[in-house]
């Protein structure tokens, strides 16, 4: 049979004019057909989910809510203004938050929707909330400092008391302490918003909420509550509950209010009288989900007007905003609602009473009021970072449609909340004296379900398998990890399941220095004469050659032992896609005191040792440091220590009380291995006579030290960025989690 030859066929067609017309017709038909297929596919794609994941490729039109707000301002949006000193001078804040301003900015969002499908989100299926702004230096419940979007419900959920009390306490007018304090459970409204309003009926079991003094509870509780989809979007944060200094209402400018709210001033300064007889200790912060706006939110929301500009408004006490000559201030603050009194979160320190908090009055000025009165409640929350806009333009007629996709951190936290037994916290509440202050969430046990595919040759999740990817394992979720910009956050740390092959030195040097045995300074530093030390060879190899930038191994070799000897370098490196997933982070490189012998160190002490300011004694003119910022490093000794789940006869906390030379609990530790592998932490040797050692995990499954020039296995470790999602897999060795950048 003859094979069709397209070149011969075309030559014959050129000799026949009538065929040319057919050729054009065919081409046009094909184009139309292709266009129809594309159009149909796109329409079907839209019907399913415009912003869903298709074959591992993310629709680039999707943008996070945070990025959208920043982009709008960058592109000249006039209803967004920074509140920092660079913009507002002496009226500015140090946090330089980005706020919506004006009489009616485009800051509407659909929230608390009964559907997660964007095309079905509307005024019937959703509530309208409004974006107050993007706030910096917000602290979450784990102590991480971050930027977060704050939103407020557009309509009130009803008129309720901030707090109330029996008549014998503060004359029945309530207590102006928002959060829990000692045995005090917190203000009535705080408890209602964070139990009943979240669907856990606790205060309103009788169908009522507190609404007036003397423990009055006559108003029906709100008909609306926040559903699980909305709750999943909310970030638990520390809210500031500082008070003013009782210096007088003339000081209540937006800037001063912002400072008062974040101060250590408490809401109770009186000491006697029936208006000040509660015994509750006041606090200046509260950690939780749902609260109220601040007085400063109202003040900074103004854009000013033609008669009274913004600068004048901000220079004027909020108490005076009801003046006829400065109506531009309140009328151009979108938070103002004429005819309605609105509660704020901030207590007011009265000289003779302990029951005042601030409110925005119906005529637009800010005043104080007894917390036992019932006023409009507009719930206010901070949102998680990975919330995306899937539609809308922010106007009242077309609010932004939001979509939340949990990242890896959220997914693992949820797994723990749902009872995963191979995930445990390492905090003091779990492990007592051997717990950490950071309360990290770690995988533990002999073989937990913590496998992930990483460094894959494909971005298509359906094509990720043992052939196209490497297997790595999740060490855990770590809190208070700093990035290169000194911002702290919760980060997932992973380690390569298999070593890189071969045995390599942690460092090496010419024989004339340390007898060729290297230095245990991991990162960049200087020599005592001021000249540059580039870092240990293993650090350099992992952060150049291993990232595809061949620098150390130009001869195809890495340093493997003393006196600069080298051996064949690994055959694998991290590709560009995997490098995009890596978070540049600060790694701790502290060590133990020279007065401590290694065999006296307990497993449960390693975490604090790594984060200490102790450095090995300097015997090689290299200035030691206690941290390093970079991409690829090694596990900590404490990662090995906390990976144990204990044994049948020894609890996890008891295991942490053993010497690092013990292997009693190694059988229940997934980081145990049949070979020696390096950690990042410098050390002394067994009798402190040598100052150039490093901790390693040994093949007999304990922690010991070894000279930096010695050859051990390498298991790279790194932190992941927070924009990664798990899209498939269950974490087992046969079905590792599949990650995509979202």
Image (cartoon, rainbow, N blue to C red):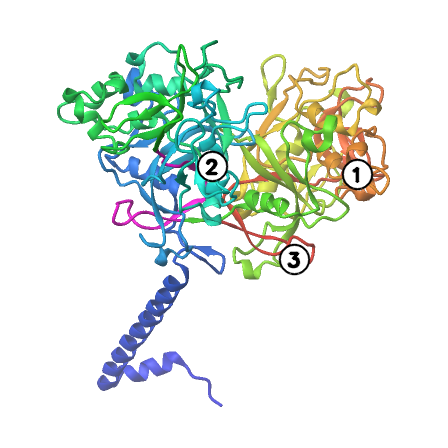
- Stretch of the chain drawn in magenta: 376-402
Query: Does the magenta run of residues contain 401?
Result: yes
Which mark is in front, 3 or 2? 2
Residue 197 in the figure: left or right of residue 590: left
On the image, the x and y values in percent for residue 520 come to 71, 24
Distance CA(mark 3)–CA(mark 2): 43 Å
Q: Is residue 498 above or below residue 117?
A: above
Decide which of 347, 38 is in the foreground and name it: 347
Depth check, mark 1 against mark 2: the one in front is 2
Q: Can I make out residue 717 in this image?
A: yes
Residue 201: image location, x then y, percent: 51, 43
Residue designated by label 2: 192
Q: Which residue is mark 1?
A: 676
Relative depth, front residue between 367 and 372: 372
Residue at far bottom of view: 1
Is mark 1 in CB contact (under 8 Å) with mark 2?
Answer: no
How many labels were placed on the picture? 3
Q: Residues within 10 Å of mark 2 (few under 14, many from 20)?
A: many
Q: Residue at x 37, y 37 (%)?
A: 151
Using the numbered discs, state the Cα–Cα distance from disc 1 to disc 2 in whole angstroms. 56 Å
Secondary structure under badge 3?
A: loop
Decide whether residue 37 is among the magenta residues. Answer: no
- Is 641 situated left or right of 91 in this image? right
Q: Residues within 10 Å of mark 3 (few under 14, many from 20)?
A: some
Judged from the image, the secondary structure of the residue bearing numbered disc 2 is: helix
Mark nearer the N terminus (3 vs 2): 2
> Label 3 belongs to which residue?
735
Above-or-below relation of 94 to 726: above
Say which quarter of the image contains residue 335. top left
Of residues 548 and 204, the one drawn nearer to the viewer in this rendering? 204
Question: Mark 2 or mark 1, which is nearer the start of the sequence?
Answer: 2
């Amino acid at each position: 049979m003859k094979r069709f030859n397209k070149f011969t066929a075309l030559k014959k067609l050129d000799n026949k004019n009538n065929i040319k017309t057919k050729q054009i017709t065919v081409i046009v038909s094909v184009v139309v057909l292709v266009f129809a297929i594309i159009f149909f596919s796109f329409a079907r794609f839209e019907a399913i989910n415009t912003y869903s994941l298709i074959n591992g490729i993310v629709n680039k039109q999707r943008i996070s809510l945070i990025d959208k707000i920043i982009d709008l301002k960058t592109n000249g949006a006039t209803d967004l203004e920074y509140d920092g000193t660079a913009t507002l001078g002496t009226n500015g804040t140090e946090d330089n938050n980005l706020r919506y301003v004006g009489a009616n900015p485009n800051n509407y969002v659909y929230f608390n929707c009964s559907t997660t499908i964007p095309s079905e989100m509307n005024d019937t299926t959703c509530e309208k909330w409004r974006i107050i702004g993007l706030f910096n230096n917000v602290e979450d419940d784990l102590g991480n400092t971050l930027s977060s979007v704050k939103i407020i419900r557009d309509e009130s959920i009803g008129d309720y008391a901030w707090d109330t009390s029996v008549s014998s306490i503060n004359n029945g007018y309530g207590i102006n302490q928002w959060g829990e304090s000692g045995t005090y459970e917190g203000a009535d409204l705080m408890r209602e918003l964070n139990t009943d309003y979240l669907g856990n009926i606790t205060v309103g079991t009788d169908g009522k909420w507190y609404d007036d003094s003397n423990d009055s509870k006559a108003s029906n509780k709100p008909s609306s509550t926040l559903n699980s989809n909305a709750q999943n979007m909310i970030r638990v944060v520390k809210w500031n509950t500082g008070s003013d200094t009782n210096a007088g209402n003339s000081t209540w400018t937006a800037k001063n209010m912002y400072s008062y709210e974040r101060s250590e001033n408490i809401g109770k300064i009186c000491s006697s009288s029936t208006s000040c007889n509660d015994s509750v200790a006041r606090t200046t912060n509260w950690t939780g989900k749902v609260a109220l706006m601040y007085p400063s939110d109202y003040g900074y929301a103004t854009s000013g007007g033609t008669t009274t500009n913004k600068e004048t408004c901000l220079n004027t006490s909020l108490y005076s905003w009801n003046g006829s000559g400065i109506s531009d201030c309140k009328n151009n603050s979108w938070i103002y609602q004429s005819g309605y009194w609105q509660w704020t979160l901030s207590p007011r320190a009265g000289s003779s009473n302990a029951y005042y908090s601030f409110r925005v009055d119906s005529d637009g000025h800010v005043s104080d009021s007894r917390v036992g009165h019932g006023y409009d409640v507009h719930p206010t929350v901070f949102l998680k970072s990975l919330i995306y806009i899937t539609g809308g333009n922010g106007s009242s007629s077309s609010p932004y449609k939001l979509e939340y996709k949990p990242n890896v951190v959220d997914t693992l936290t949820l797994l723990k909340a749902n009872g995963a037994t191979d995930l445990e916290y390492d905090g003091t509440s779990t492990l007592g004296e051997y717990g950490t202050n950071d309360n990290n969430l770690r995988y533990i046990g002999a073989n937990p379900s913590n496998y992930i595919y990483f460094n894959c040759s494909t971005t298509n999740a359906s094509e990720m398998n043992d052939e196209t990817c490497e297997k790595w394992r999740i060490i855990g979720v770590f809190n208070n990890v700093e990035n290169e910009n000194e911002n702290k956050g919760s980060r997932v740390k992973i380690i390569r399941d298999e070593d890189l092959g071969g045995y390599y030195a942690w460092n090496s040097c010419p024989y004339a220095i340390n007898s060729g045995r290297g230095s245990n300074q991991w990162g960049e530093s200087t020599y005592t004469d001021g000249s540059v030390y580039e870092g240990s060879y293993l650090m350099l190899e992992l952060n150049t050659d291993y990232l595809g930038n061949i620098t150390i191994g130009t001869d195809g070799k890495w340093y493997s032992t003393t006196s600069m000897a080298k051996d064949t370098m690994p055959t694998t490196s991290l590709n560009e896609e995997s490098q995009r997933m890596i978070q540049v982070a600060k790694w701790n490189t502290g060590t133990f005191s020279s007065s401590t012998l290694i065999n006296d160190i307990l497993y449960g002490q390693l975490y604090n040792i790594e984060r200490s300011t102790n450095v090995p004694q300097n015997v090689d003119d290299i200035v030691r440091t206690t941290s390093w910022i970079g991409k690829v490093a090694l596990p900590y000794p404490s990662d090995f220590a906390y990976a144990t789940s204990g044994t049948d006869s020894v609890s996890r906390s008891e295991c942490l009380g053993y010497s690092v030379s013990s292997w009693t609990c190694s059988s229940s530790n997934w980081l145990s291995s049949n070979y020696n592998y390096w950690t990042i932490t410098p050390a002394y040797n067994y009798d402190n006579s040598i100052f150039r050692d490093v901790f390693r995990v040994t093949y007999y499954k304990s922690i010991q030290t070894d000279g930096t020039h010695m050859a051990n296995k390498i298991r790279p470790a790194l932190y992941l960025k927070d924009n990664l999602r798990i899209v498939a897999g269950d974490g087992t060795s046969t079905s590792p989690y599949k990650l995509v950048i979202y």
